[in-house]
Image (cartoon, helix red, strand yellow):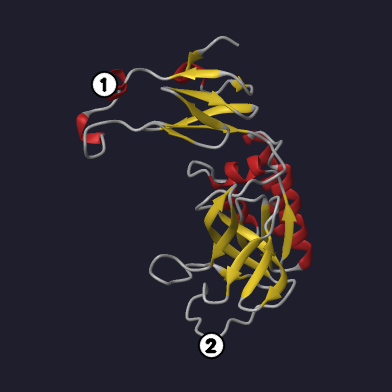
Amino acid sequence: MSPVWAQDAVGRVVLPGDVLLLPPPQSQDALLSLSSLPSGGRLRVVCGPGLMRQGDDLLVSKCGLLRHRDPAVYWVDSQQKRYVPVKGDHVIGIVTTKSGDIFKLDTGGSEQASLSFLAFEGATKKNRPNVKVGDLVYGQFIVANKDMEPELVCIDSSGRANGKGVIGQDGLMFKVSVGLVRKLLTPQNDIIQELMKVYPLEIVIGMNGRIWVKAKTIQQTLIVANILEACEYLTAEQRKQVFAKFSDNVL
């Protein structure tokens, strides 16, 4: 495909090797009011997963739908199964080994990630976290690049867990596509809110395509998992019909 304007390609299928043209900086600034620009007065274009910078333009590196979020964030929405670690992503990992003060976790990437025992809220050399092989851990990548081993933490910059850490053992973890995870985590998406009206539940969603859920009963937990997996292919109208059906059964 010949080069096209990035704004015109939003919502269309793009292929690896496609070039997306960005307007000159002066034209980009004109798209927004000066009050919405960051300090410095210059709009900064951010390319997300599936895109690379090529001079002043963007080069597509992954097949999928081109997405855009204001003010100037572009990414490719694909249905890939394989997860590639990204710094800042929140993921669900499985503890595979413990070596000294370091835990090794399977996060679904090409290599295992490391997690220090001090990377938990309140952890000290005397107060070590109770983490065992086979446990599920919800953490965040602080190191993720091709030249270094991926590294996770279960605390934020202020030392608080904020929901991160070892996940309960009673629920169910299952795997979905990375594309479905992004769909569920989109602010405009209300799938989880609609589902919680049908079945009260606990849920943890990892950017690596792993979801952990726990409802009141094992049967409800399995139903929730099946509904979430099906949401990848259901339209909004079909989803409402499914939720209404199970809502009537609960009543």
Describe residue 249's horizontal placement relative to residue 39 as left or right.
Answer: right
Q: Determine the image quadrant of residue 79.
A: top right
Disc 1 versus disc 2: distance between alpha carbons? Answer: 55 Å
x, y percentage for residue 30?
26, 21
Asked which secondary structure carries label 2, the reply is loop
What residue sits 64% from the left and 34% below the top?
Answer: 78
Q: What's under tag 1, amino acid-wise? A: Ala
Residue 30: mark: 1
Name the one closer to the observer, 52 or 12: 52
Question: Eyeballing the image, is 186 above or below 223?
Answer: above
- Tell me the amino acid under the disc marked 2: Asn
Vertical arrangement, residue 171 with respect to residue 211, above or below: below
Can you tell which mark lies on residue 63? none
Q: Confirm or deny contact between disc 1 and disc 2 (CB under 8 A).
A: no
Element marked by disc 1: helix
Residue situated in front as seen by the camera: 163 or 59 = 59
**Residue 8 locus on image (x, y percent):** 48, 16
Residue displayed at 48% across by 76% down: 121
Frontmost residue, 22 versus 203: 22
Tell me the quarter of the picture where residue 219 sits: bottom right
Q: For the point 63% across and 82% down, which residue is it?
A: 130
Number of callouts? 2
Determine which of the numbered discs, if any, sits on residue 127 in the image: 2
